[in-house]
Image: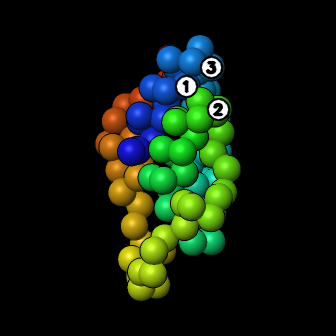
Amino acid sequence: MNLIEFIEHRKEIKKPMTARAVKMLEKKLSRLQVQGYDPDLLLERSMINGWQDVYPHDSCKYQKQGFIEKHMDTSWADDFRKSEILPERVN
């Protein structure tokens, strides 16, 4: 699961994200990651439930990883950063 898939999900439910909303979501996921949540699981849970946002939940916490792995893994945003999906409005 990654951010691009979530952006596509938002398009499919007819709620496309603006470029600003995407940046805000990326910051939110980063903050939640520092708190011990796995961004991939948060995005997956939101898509499964048809939500427009991500919400922290205990089932989405990391399973006993070391500090470095937990706080340095940003793979959930890698594809997004490599893409050129940031126009005025993500359609």
Above or below residue 16? Residue 60 is below
Instruction: Please name the residue shown 42% across and 80% down the image.
Output: 65
Q: Report the residue marked by disc 1.
A: 10
Instruction: Please name the residue shown 48% across and 53% down the image.
Output: 41
Q: Earlier in the sequence, mark 3 or mark 1?
A: 1
Instruction: Please name the residue shown 63% across and 45% down the image.
Output: 54
Q: Where is residue 71 in the image (x, y as percent from the top left)?
A: 48, 74
Q: Report the residue marked by disc 2.
A: 52
Q: Where is residue 35 in the image (x, y as percent from the top left)?
A: 62, 71
The secondary element bearing badge 3 is classed as loop
Q: Report the residue marked by disc 3.
A: 15
Q: In this view, does 54 lie to the left or right of 79?
A: right
11 or 81, which is in the foreground? 11
Q: Which of marks 1 and 2 is nearer the N terminus?
A: 1
Amino acid type, mark 2: Gln
Amino acid type, mark 3: Lys
Give yes or no for contact between labels 2 and 3 (Cβ–Cβ under 8 Å).
Answer: yes
Above or below residue 82? Residue 66 is below
Q: Which of marks 2 and 3 is nearer the N terminus?
A: 3
86 or 1, which is in the foreground? 1
The secondary element bearing badge 2 is classed as loop
